[in-house]
C-alpha cells in the first residue's frame, strides 16, 4: 500500500517570513516557484562571466532610465519569487525607499542557464 505525501504550497509572504525567522538563509540558495521552494543551481565561473557581461551590456543600454538588478528576488505573484540572473526594472516608489521588485515594473527577466523557464519554454543557452 502506497501513501501519497501531501504537498504544501507557500505564499511569498510565508516564504519571506521563513527567511526572517532564520528557517531559510542566504546559504540555502532557494527560490519560490509556483508555491514550491526550489533549490537553485550553483554559480560556476562560466555562469558568473555570463551574468557579469550581460550586466555590463544592459547597464550601458538602459543608462539611468531603468535599473539592472542582478540575482535579486522578484515577486511575480503571491506564489512565486524567483531570483533571475538579471532583471531590467522600472523604478517605483514604495514606502520609504525606491525599489523595483514588483512584476508590474519589470521589462525583462533573464537567466543564464539552458534549463526550462517558468513558462515551460527552453531558455536560450548562455
Image (cartoon, grey):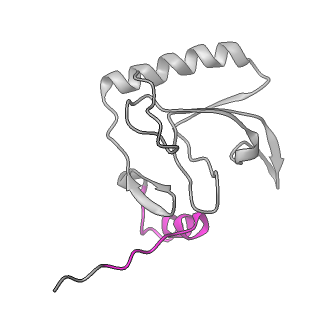
Q: Is residue 48 above or below residue 120?
A: above
In this rendering, the count of numbered labels is 0
User: What percent of the width, then of the height, locates residue 47?
Assistant: 37, 26
Quick one: which residue is furthest to the front in this view? 1
In the rendered structure, does residue 18 fall within the stretch colored magenta? yes
In the image, 5 versus 95, the foreground residue is 5
User: What percent of the width, then of the height, locates residue 106?
Assistant: 70, 38
User: What percent of the width, then of the height, locates residue 41?
Assistant: 33, 42
User: What percent of the width, then of the height, locates residue 98?
Assistant: 78, 43
Q: Is residue 47 above or below residue 92?
A: above
| Screen quadrant of the C terminus | top left
Q: Residue at x 38, y 30 (%)?
A: 114
In the image, 118 versus 66, the foreground residue is 118
Q: Residue at x 43, y 20 (%)?
A: 50
Quick one: which residue is furthest to the bottom in this view? 1
Q: Is residue 67 above or below residue 19?
A: above
In the rendered structure, does residue 49 fall within the stretch colored magenta? no
Q: Which residues are magenta?
A: 5-25
Task: Answer with left or right where residue 37 lies relative to residue 17.
Answer: left
| Screen quadrant of the N terminus | bottom left
Quick one: which residue is furthest to the left in this view? 1
Q: Residue at x 49, y 55 (%)?
A: 33
Amino acid at each position: 500500500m502506497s501513501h501519497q505525501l501531501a504537498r504544501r504550497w507557500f505564499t511569498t509572504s510565508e516564504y519571506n517570513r521563513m527567511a526572517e525567522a532564520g528557517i531559510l538563509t542566504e546559504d540555502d540558495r532557494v527560490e519560490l516557484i509556483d508555491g514550491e521552494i526550489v533549490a537553485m543551481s550553483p554559480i560556476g565561473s562560466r555562469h558568473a562571466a555570463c551574468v557579469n557581461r550581460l550586466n555590463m551590456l544592459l547597464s550601458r543600454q538602459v543608462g539611468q532610465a531603468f535599473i539592472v538588478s542582478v540575482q535579486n528576488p522578484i515577486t511575480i505573484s503571491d506564489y512565486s519569487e524567483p531570483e533571475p540572473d538579471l532583471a531590467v526594472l522600472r523604478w517605483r516608489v514604495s514606502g520609504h525607499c525606491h525599489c523595483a521588485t514588483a512584476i508590474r515594473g519589470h521589462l525583462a527577466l533573464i537567466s543564464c542557464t539552458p534549463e526550462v523557464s517558468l513558462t515551460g519554454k527552453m531558455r536560450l543557452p548562455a
